[in-house]
Image: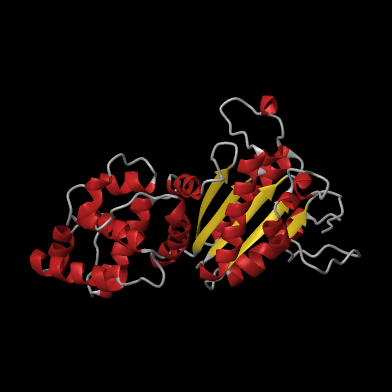
Amino acid sequence: MKIDRNTWLDLIDREYLDGFVKDGGAAVKFALVSDRRDGDSLVEEMGRRAQTHGYLVAVVDAAATRVQYTQDVFFSIARQVPWTDLTRRYLTKIYGDLGYRVEGEDIQIEAVAAANGVEPNLLRMELRLALQQQLIRRSDELAKDFRWAMFGLCAGEAGLTPDVAAVNEWLRGELRLISGLKIFQIFRKIARHNARAMIASLGAWCRMAGLTGLTLVIDIRQLAIAKRPEVAPDTVFYTMAALIDCYEVLRQLIDDTDDLDGVLCLVLSRPELFDQDNRRGVNAYKALKERVFTDVVIHQAPNPLSSVVSFDSVSMTS
């Protein structure tokens, strides 16, 4: 059965972007679209609505990113994040909490101290203490390495540390030597074992910086291509083993929703990946199938609040 796209988007806007997720919840939704242009249009409209509500929007395309590796998913997101803007937003909030006003665009300690008539050394001590109390100790929301990375970015923007290029490279997966981050108490690169925690931390960091949250689009339409010769040049081909790993990444993301803060994830797929006769479909991985299909199916009308919605005239069965 088919769901009208605009009706569904209005519901997502009202119930999630301006409701549940805005209040700190998290959800993962699957949208099935067969037409390439319709799918691209859906992503564009979702992004526009999310930005209107103050969300950071990131799009991960399985054609360009190896979705079977959680760290690659995070690196793709990280390359779209305006880290400097988020850091400046957060620092401005910290200055305000300390009772200092920020004039103009300069948020370095010397400029803020001059604008408020205080000694820079005094403000420097207060800022370090505030960052330790309000950022480093936020272990319930931010992973340890993520907290120290954000501390480094804040220190750089405030003028406490001269160079934080290594932090940005670490976040984007471009850092060659981890030794450059020891000063920030970071001793390991982002990999499969900690990438999920980094994604969760980013959602919380967006909210701490004054945004509503994170809207993440994962486009897995590339997974439907079964033959390597049919894959466009310079795009990723997924073997069956890689396909199962992709489904595991999505399964983990669904299971992590209780720990996510202000994150809405839209997974864009072709309908055939949810066809029970397709060997490359979600039926190939029971753990994901059980999480996206409910036991009760209403055949009279589509459920716009279900985990999986189709924008094509096909019946959805489990």
Residue 86 image position (x, y, % from top left): 37, 57
**Which colour scheme appears in the figure?**
secondary structure
Towards the viewer: 207 or 151: 151
Residue 176, placed above or below residue 284: above
Name the residue at 63% across, 42% down: 241
Residue 239 image position (x, y, % from top left): 64, 37
Residue 268 image position (x, y, % from top left): 67, 49
Residue 44 in view of the camera? no
Check the picture and name the quadrant holding the N terminus.
bottom right
Residue 63, placed above or below residue 31: above
Towards the viewer: 196 or 9: 196
Name the residue at 23% across, 46% down: 179
Name the residue at 83% across, 56% down: 316
Residue 163, placed above or below residue 295: above
> Furthest-front residue in view?
241
Residue 246 image position (x, y, % from top left): 61, 48
